[in-house]
Structures are given as structure tokens and as C-alpha cells.
Image (tube, rainbow, N blue to C red):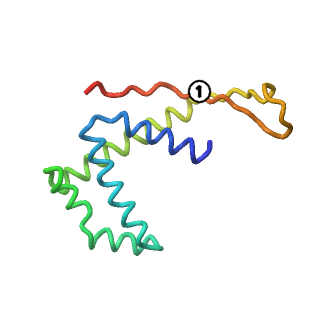
């Protein structure tokens, strides 16, 4: 499956999280992304992550301990990974190439499984 579709499905899963979990996850990922843009190697990223105290700042922002934050992030990431695996396995592709007349082009209809969004 294409990287674009994986990213799209992941965004959909994140949007389906309860508001508090979604806010926490997006806060941390956005801060990590800002730091990642400033470095060129994984080692530099890890060093900057520690220096910036990204996780402690996130914990403080959400009124959590550092350990509570890490446990929450782990739970959220497991939920995203499980949802992504399920959806990737349930996506169906229908070849509709016969519907277009342009030679060399392919057309597919991609049917995604439903994501249950929180009501709150």
C-alpha cells in the first residue's frame, strides 16, 4: 500500500481518538516534528529531544506526570497501530481501468473500512 494511503488512514485514526487523547498525541507529535526539522541524524534528534525536555513540557501542559504521559502515549500508539493494521487488511481495491480510454493509465476504486468517531 502506498505511503500516502498509510498516512491518510493514520490521520483518520488519530481524528477518531477521544478529544483528550487526540490533543495529547498531536501536541507531542507536533513538537517532535519541529525538532526533527532542525537535525540531520537520529542521534541529533534524540539529543535535542532530551535537551528540549519535550515530554516533560507535554506532561506539564496536560497536568500529568512524565510516567503518565509516556503510558498514555504508548496506549495511543498501540491503538493507532492496531487500527492501522486492521484497516490495511480490510481495504479493498477495485480495478476500474476498463472505464477510462487513456492507454497506460490505471484507475482503482479504494474502499476504506468505516472508522468509528467519538461522539464527544
Q: For the residue carrying disc 1, how many other residues have a C-alpha within 10 Å: few (<14), some (14-19), or many (20+)?
A: few
Quadrant of the snapshot with the N terminus? top right
Q: Is residue 8 left or right of residue 48?
A: right
Circle 1: element type: strand
Q: Nearer the viewer, residue 26 or 84?
A: 26
Asked if 113 appears above or below 3 in the picture, the reply is above
Residue shown at 58%/48% (left/top)? 3
Q: Quadrant of residue 109?
A: top right
Q: Quadrant of residue 95?
A: top right
- Where does the image place residue 73, in percent across and percent down from the top left? 30, 48
Residue shown at 37%/37% (left/top)? 15
Quadrant of the snapshot with the C terminus? top left
Residue shown at 48%/38% (left/top)? 84
Q: Is residue 67 left or right of residue 46?
A: left
Residue shown at 36%/67% (left/top)? 35
Residue lying furthest front:
101
- Where does the image place residue 29, in percent across and percent down from the top left? 35, 54
Q: Nearer the viewer, residue 99 or 62?
A: 99
Asked if 54 appears above or below 73 in the picture, the reply is below
Q: Is residue 68 left or right of residue 31?
A: left
- Where does the image place residue 66, in percent across and percent down from the top left? 19, 57
Residue that mark 1 sits on: 111
Amino acid at each position: 500500500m502506498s505511503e500516502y494511503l498509510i498516512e491518510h488512514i493514520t490521520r483518520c485514526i488519530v481524528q477518531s481518538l477521544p478529544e483528550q487523547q487526540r490533543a495529547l498525541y498531536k501536541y507531542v507529535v507536533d513538537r517532535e516534528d519541529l525538532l526533527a526539522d532542525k537535525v540531520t541524524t537520529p542521534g541529533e534528534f534524540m539529543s535535542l529531544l532530551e535537551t528540549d525536555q519535550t515530554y516533560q513540557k507535554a506532561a506539564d501542559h496536560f497536568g500529568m506526570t512524565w510516567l503518565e504521559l509516556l503510558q498514555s502515549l504508548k496506549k495511543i500508539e498501540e491503538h493507532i497501530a492496531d487500527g492501522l493494521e486492521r484497516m490495511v487488511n480490510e481495504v479493498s481495491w477495485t480495478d476500474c481501468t476498463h472505464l477510462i480510454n487513456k492507454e497506460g493509465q490505471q484507475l482503482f476504486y479504494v474502499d476504506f473500512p468505516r472508522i468509528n468517531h467519538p461522539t464527544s
